[in-house]
Every structure is written in structure tokens, then in C-alpha cells.
Image (spheres, helix red, strand yellow):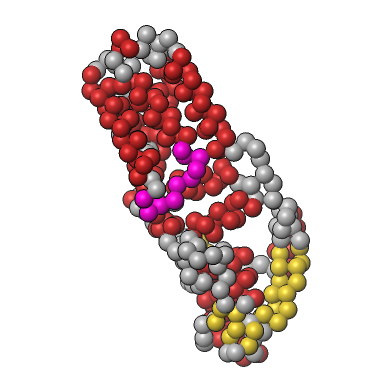
Amino acid sequence: MYFVSIDSLPGFMFEYEYYKRGVTEQAINISCDEKQKLVAALYENAKEENKYYLYDFNYDNCTTRLRDILEKAAGKKLETKNILPKPGTTFRHLIHTYLDRGGQQWSKLGIDILLGNPMDKKVTNREAMFLPDYLLMAFDSSTLNNKQIVSEKKILLNYFDFYKTKSIITPLLVFIVLFLVILLMSIYSNNNRNLFFKIFDFLIFTLLGLLGILILFMWFGTDHAMCKNNFNLLWALPIHLPVAFMLFSKKKWVKNYFRFIFFYTIALLLAKFFLPQQFNTALLPVLGIILVRSFFISKPIDMSY
């Protein structure tokens, strides 16, 4: 549950100045009667019995509520020109725009892993307003009762480029390097069952199993609608967790399991282009590591020396 609270403009500005966050002011062009209705609605919404709501990141958040309360006060929906960057834009594309601009590649990876297929829905103009930038663009291009909704706009705090940083240490680079190291070591190692590989295989498949359990929990154990129908579960298999603890054994079924995982991963790499969910590019070398290690784990013992 989220809740709305009332703050003074000086207090709000002080906080945004402290955290170096940009603020743009839009003067809303509505009648005095509509302004009174809007202010009354804001105070009504902030009452103790009304202020709590079940937060939905894409459909009911602190941004969409600004649009909704304005429309309620005016008694009419906004007429908005196209604000989408291109046809076929999805929720995930819009989130990526924010994260790429801020150089947040690790956050982008985490979001792409935990948020499932609903994020790949094509958005409408109205749905794009769940993000502040797109609500701002929507207001700029909207009319209400045949009047431009914004009469004036000015920047109060100009920190919009403050977080536009890029790091060369991206998930894709880190995982490519790790994949190449593991590939070369696996090929040229005299013993693919030495202590290093026993520990590495145990850690990588334990982490994959734990990640699969987390995805399942976010899908079935929470109210987050965007975490449902998550196809990342196809590679982060929860069953990897118990099998990881059997890697130190010499049971035949363990080799058969990883032989299956080897061919399964090949099929998954081919199928990923047809799945209804966009996968983060940095996951490709991770799948490569799964492919390499499952191949060498499944080899007969006499071929590993």
C-alpha cells in the first residue's frame, strides 16, 4: 500500500535541490471553477481514509494519479497528440529509455530479469503517462475543452543531465569476459572436475536455482502484476538448486541431467527470438556459461582427463 502526503513547495524544492533532481513547472490552463474542484479533490484524496492505495507501477502510480485527478476535476479526458517514440513501443522500451540515459545498466538487468511478459505489452499514449517525462509531454501536447492544457512551462531546477553517466563495467562486458575465461579454462583444463570447477559449478547452478525461486515468488507470491508470466524462468530453473548439491556425487542421473540441460539450452537460445518477452542482451553470455559447463559436466569421466 502506498499513500499520498501533503508537502510545502519550499520543502519539496529543498529536497530536490539536495538530491540534485530536476523540476519542471507547468502552469495548467483551466477555469477557476475547475481549479477549485481540483484543489478540493486533492485535499479529499489526502484524507486519512482516502490516502492509501494499492500501488501499481504501470497503471496506478503517483504519476497516473495526477492525470486522473485533473480529468476528474475537468469532467473530461485529455485529448493528447502522439507522445510515443515509435510504433510498437512497449512498457519495457520506455523503462529502458530512462535507464540507458542514466547509465543504469545493472539496474536494467535486474529489472529485465524480475519483470515478465506484461512489460512487453505495446503501450498507448495514455498508458505511457505512467512515467513523469511522458506525462509532461502529454500535458504539453494536450487540449481540454478545446484549450491547450499548459499555458506556461519553465524549469525550476535544471539537474536533468546530472545523472547521465556511463560506466564501461557493464553486465554485458563482465559476463562476456567470464564466459570467455570459463570457455578457455574448460577446453584447456586437464581435469574439468578439479576443485575450481567443482566450486564454480556449484556456485553458478546454486545461484541460478535461487534466482528461479525468486522469480517464482515474485510471480505467485506478490501482487506485482508486471512480475507475472516471466519467461526468464526458462533459464533460471529452480530445479538447479537441489541438483547443484549433487554435483560432488558420481551418480549417473546427474550427468544425464546436465546432458539434457546442454541440449535444452541450445533449444532455448534458438527459441528466444520467438518468445513473447524481450531478454536482456547481457544474459546471452550467461546462457553460454550454462551451455559450456553443462557440456563438460555431462562428459564421461574418462574424457575429462
Point 31% across, 35% down: residue: 264
Left or right side of 158 for 94? left
Give percent across and percent down for residue 194: 41, 12
Task: State yes or no: residue 124 in magenta.
Answer: no
Give percent across and percent down for residue 107: 55, 46
- Given residues 23 and 14, the one toward you in this image is 23
Give percent across and percent down for residue 108: 54, 47
Point 75% across, 68% down: residue: 155
The range drawn in magenta is 274-284
- Given residues 50 and 251, the one toward you in this image is 251
**Number of callouts in the render?**
0
Please, is residue 60 above or below residue 178 in the view? below
- Given residues 62 and 226, the one toward you in this image is 226
User: Which image quadrant for residue 193?
Assistant: top left
Please, is residue 134 above or below residue 15 in the view? below
Left or right side of 136 for 10? right
* Magenta: main secondary structure: loop
Left or right side of 153 for 94? left
